[in-house]
Amino acid sequence: MEVRGKITGICTSVDIGTPKRNIHQANLIRNFGVEGDGHGGPHTDKQVSLLSYEKIQAFTGKDAEVKEGAFGENLVVQGIDFSIYPVGTQFRSGDVILEITHKGEICEVCKMKKTPGECLMQKEGIFCRVVMGGIVTEGDYLHLED
């Protein structure tokens, strides 16, 4: 069975530790991350952050109004439970290949906790490095690489 999820949000912010806004399309740069995003850079293996759409929806069920990027995630993906995949797993969208480098995040200075009241990235977030770059657009699919 093919594993694939639909990208429902592509988000960036200039600063680290702040909510991101949905820009709907982005250039992912090899060994850097999302062009224009504060988390990008060759110095980090947390170049791109992913969060499951379903995890956001479950949180939203707690009567919180949450927009894409509220937890600092770069890509919101519907249909993939990232928690079951180990570090080293690769996903592809078109030419873009992402490799999981970290699961979860401990963040001491994080503005996301103040707005939605909890940060899903700490428990549910996945961090990747960009193995191959390219353009991603809302509506594109992310596939598990074999």
Image (cartoon, rainbow, N blue to C red):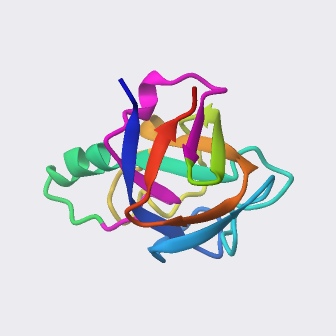
Q: Would residue 58 be seen by someone viewing this image from the given angle?
A: yes
The residue drawn where x is 29% and y is 50% is 56
Point out the image quarter for the N terminus.
top left
Q: Nearer the viewer, residue 96 or 130?
A: 96
Q: How many marks?
A: 0
Q: Find out whether residue 82 is within the magenta segment.
A: yes
The residue drawn where x is 37% and y is 65% is 68
Q: Nearer the viewer, residue 88 or 67?
A: 88
The residue drawn where x is 44% and y is 28% is 83
Q: Is residue 124 left or right of residue 94?
A: left
Residue range highlighted in magenta? 67-92
Task: Choose top left, top right, bottom left or bottom right for residue 102.
Answer: top right
Task: Choose top left, top right, bottom left or bottom right for residue 145.
Answer: top right
Q: Nearer the viewer, residue 5 or 60?
A: 5
Residue 32 in the image, given as x and y percentages of width and height: 78, 58
Residue 47 in the image, given as x and y percentages of width and height: 70, 52
